[in-house]
Amino acid sequence: MLDSLIHSLWLAPLVACMVIVAIHSYLGLHVIGREVIFVDLSLAQMAALGSTVAVFAGHEPDAPASFWYALGFTSLGAVLFALTRSKTKTRVPQEAIIGIVFVVASAAALLVADQAPRGGEAIKDILVGSLLWVGWAPIGRLAVVYVLVGIFHYIMRQRFCTISLDPEKATREGWNIRWWDFWFYLSFGVVITFSVPIVGVLLVFSFLVVPAAIAYQFAERWRPLTIIAWIAGMIASTAGIFLSFHYDLPTGPVVVCVFGLLLILSFGLKRVTMGPAA
């Protein structure tokens, strides 16, 4: 009886992680390819700021209005990152702008939370999410949105992959990189807006960056990169949730730590099988 109950409790979080891994690990390949590692944290924090403002305005954290607030602030970040993209090296790199947006959004969220009812609890929920208590209805909405975003990226794959991995080619062919960046970051923001309330800011970063970082150690072409990233994300999610339930530990932090351990193991595996990096 107890085993059946535990199984039913961890099944929904596991499925949620599998759905999130499917799109986040793919987007993480773009993030590392573009060398804007903290753009996901920054956009996630913009979504968190929007959710906090919604709470301040009197909306419940899970209300539709809170989602639109979060999406609006995330879209603002997408516009900013698209406009600050430069074709040539600048004295102030885009990564610095991304870091500044993250810090300012974090500070603003704290200021708003200080004046909002249950502001402190809202900030905590945003950081760690509510993965353990996720229901099937939110998972279904998540899956539908991610399928639509996946179809969009599949249609635009040539543009997005070229700009991420070979921006010089995109420049030579006269593409409006800022325009395409806007659509990339907007779709990115939609994904994050849906995932932050479930898994929190910290786990969003892990889902995006760690599987991609593992994949880039063992492959260069897009298809094997994607497959390796998916496999790494699924392994870390499954192991993290199992350990969390088996040892009665907080789910989100355990999954994050398992992602970190898997990354370390992948570095060791690469060194053993392929030798040290040049």
Image (cartoon, rainbow, N blue to C red):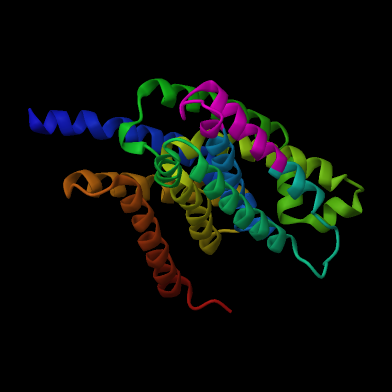
Tell me the residue at 63%/39% (across/down). 189
> Viewer-proximal residue, 5 or 235?
5
**Taking 31 as reference, is 140 above or below it?**
above
Q: Viewed as shown, does residue 192 lie left or right of 117?
A: right
Name the spot of residue 79 as percent of width and height, x first.
76, 42
Name the spot of residue 82 as percent of width and height, x first.
77, 47
Quadrant in which residue 88 is drawn? bottom right
Q: Residue furthest front?
A: 115
Q: Which residues are magenta?
A: 54-76
Is residue 221 in view from this perspective? no
Quarter in which the N terminus is drawn? top left
Name the spot of residue 228 as percent of width and height, x first.
48, 51
> Viewer-proximal residue, 103 or 199?
103
Q: Viewed as shown, does residue 253 lie left or right of 171?
A: left
**Taking 215 as reference, is 186 above or below it?**
above
Tell me the residue at 58%/53% (across/down). 107
Tell me the residue at 31%/44% (across/down). 238
Magenta segment: does it hold 100? no
